[in-house]
């Protein structure tokens, strides 16, 4: 597909159109377009510069390729401000379909286990922005917690908190520890969650100095927890979450929107 780059902002400038592809299923674009169509009907929107399908495509290009709004505007023949509004609206629509914590744990109970872990979404910030600087990762970012099934399928992503937030502090603040305790769900987590108590199980410290059964426990624990990394790999396959340039207040919305995209049912 060739998209014209001639817009009022670039008219008269030397621009070169080029064919490009987006590595997402066509059905996903259609699904997002349908959600936008329902939103427009609810808001009684009569006319837009872009139709629902192109607005969905615009937002997915932004999320998947992390292109700037000026690039998006040029590619879709709209202004930079309009591109921002369309993407922002699409993110809100998608985030609205992401499950809450209690909804995500529905159906789980005693005898089940989940994996809990945290990751850092890198952001553009200067060193002076101390709350966003993670000493663990040695970079600025936002802390996001995830709960996954034993096979690594994400059940829930948390809102984003400043990168300096410790994983255990974040897990408690989001209510993860209490929610799993209430349902008697076993939680497998790394050493960052040591001290959580309740139903949270973490590896032993200095296991090489402990008896063999301690070392075996750590090996088994690591094997069971390993699939949880798949959730973050899927999350960061959307390039906008490899290094976000947006406001830190929008990162949580982006994470929720991507979660919806990861779990979309195209049969609608």
Image (cartoon, rainbow, N blue to C red):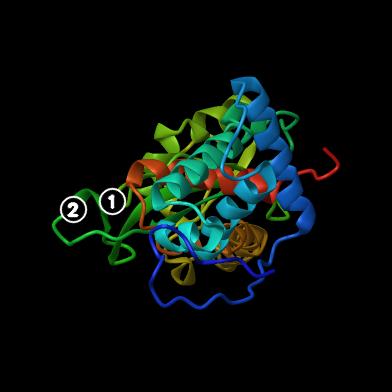
Residue under the image location 63 percent in, 54 percent down: 57
Please state if 26 lies on the left or on the right of 203 as rendered: right
Pinpoint residue 207: horizontal percent, then vertical percent: 48, 66
Residue under the image location 57 percent in, 59 percent down: 61
Please state if 127 lies on the left or on the right of 162 as rendered: left
Q: Nearer the viewer, mark 2 or mark 1?
A: 2
Pinpoint residue 195: horizontal percent, then vertical percent: 41, 43
Please state if 59 lies on the left or on the right of 133 as rendered: right
Pinpoint residue 217: horizontal percent, then vertical percent: 61, 60
Mark 1 burial class by Cα count in 10 Å: few <14, some 14-19, many 20+:
many
- Marker disc for residue 130: 2
Q: Nearer the viewer, residue 257 or 161?
A: 257
Residue under the image location 59 percent in, 22 percent down: 43
Residue under the image location 56 percent in, 41 percent down: 90
Q: Nearer the viewer, residue 185 or 122?
A: 122
Image quarter (top left, top right, bottom left or bottom right) of the N terminus: bottom right
- The answer to which quarter of the image holds residue 181 is top right
Q: Secondary structure at mark 2?
A: helix
- The answer to which quarter of the image holds residue 182 is top right
- Marker disc for residue 164: 1
Q: How many marks?
A: 2
Pinpoint residue 125: horizontal percent, then vertical percent: 24, 59
8 vs 183: above or below: below
């Amino acid at each position: 597909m060739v998209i014209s780059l001639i817009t009022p902002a670039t008219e008269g400038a030397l621009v070169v159109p080029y064919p490009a592809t987006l590595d997402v299923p066509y059905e996903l674009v259609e699904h997002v377009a349908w959600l936008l169509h329902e939103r427009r009907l609810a808001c009684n929107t009569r006319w837009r510069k872009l139709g629902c399908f192109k607005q969905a495509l615009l937002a997915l290009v932004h999320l998947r390729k992390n292109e700037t709004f000026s690039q998006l505007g040029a590619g879709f023949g709209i202004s930079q401000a309009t591109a921002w509004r369309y993407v922002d609206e699409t993110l809100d629509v998608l985030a609205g379909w992401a499950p809450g914590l209690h909804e995500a744990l529905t159906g789980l109970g005693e005898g089940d286990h989940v994996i809990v872990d945290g990751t850092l979404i890198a952001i553009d910030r200067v060193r002076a922005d101390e709350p966003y600087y993670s000493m663990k990762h040695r970079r600025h970012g936002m802390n996001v917690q995830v709960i996954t099934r034993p096979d690594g399928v994400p059940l829930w992503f948390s809102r984003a908190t400043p990168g300096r937030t410790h994983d255990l502090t974040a897990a408690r603040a989001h209510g993860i520890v209490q929610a799993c305790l209430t349902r008697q769900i076993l939680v497998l987590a790394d050493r960052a969650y040591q001290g959580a108590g309740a139903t949270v199980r973490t590896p032993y410290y200095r296991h090489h100095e402990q008896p063999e059964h301690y070392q075996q426990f750590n090996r088994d624990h690591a094997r069971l927890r390993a699939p949880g990394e798949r959730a973050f790999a899927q999350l960061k396959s959307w390039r906008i979450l490899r290094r976000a340039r947006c406001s830190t207040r929008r990162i949580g919305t982006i994470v929720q929107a991507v979660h919806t995209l990861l779990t979309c049912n195209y049969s609608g």
